[in-house]
Image (cartoon, rainbow, N blue to C red):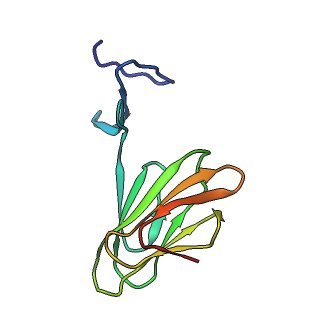
Amino acid sequence: MANTTFSGPVRSENGFESITINQTTGAVTINSTYGAVVIASTQALSGAGAANLTTSITEVTATATGNVVTLADGSAGQIKTITMVAENAGTDTVVITPATFAGGTTVTLDTVGEAATFQYNATIGWVLLNTNGGSVA
């Protein structure tokens, strides 16, 4: 089958790609590839800010101690991973603050390579699935 663009739900036996098309230039951006393995796009965030809900991964470069990264309520079943990938100084931290967090208020990452993975539940909010070194408060 040739490449085809749809504007609604799609089923495929051999995987598919989720894309967006720039309305001005017509450039196509692949957001995710689905098949045997799901490959998700990544948001790069420098310092404090909002983790978006349109990518599965947010990579944060910490620029100060206590960089707050907010996480708005998501969609049921949505998974979000936030990773501290770099820092400007040895004491920089990332404080993840979900709008609705079942089991805490924040997760703090204080070392490059630390991450937190959440799944959104429509009833109780973001549930922390895993963290490798992050502190939950």
Dividing the picture into quadrants, the one containing residue 81 is: bottom left
Percent x, y for residue 80? 48, 54
Q: Quadrant of the N terminus?
A: top left
Q: Is residue 58 above or below residue 26?
A: below
Residue 113, image quadrant: bottom left
Q: Residue at x 43, y 22 (%)?
A: 6
Identify the residue at horizontal 35%, vertical 77% (top origin).
Answer: 111
Residue 133 appears in which quarter of the rendering?
bottom left
For the point 45% across and 69% down, the residue is 49
Viewer-closest of 69 and 28? 69
x and y, in percent, of residue 131 in the image: 46, 65
The residue furthest right is 123
Residue 43, position in %: x, y?
37, 56
Q: Quadrant of the C terminus?
A: bottom right
x, y percent for residue 95? 48, 75
Q: Residue at x 68, y 49 (%)?
A: 122
On screen, residue 53 above or below 61: above
For the residue pair 29 and 10, the one nearer the viewer reads as: 10
Q: Going by the image, does 26 lie left or right of 47?
A: left
How many marks on residues? 0
Residue 36 higher or lower than 79, as above or below: above
Q: Is residue 70 left or right of residue 15?
A: right
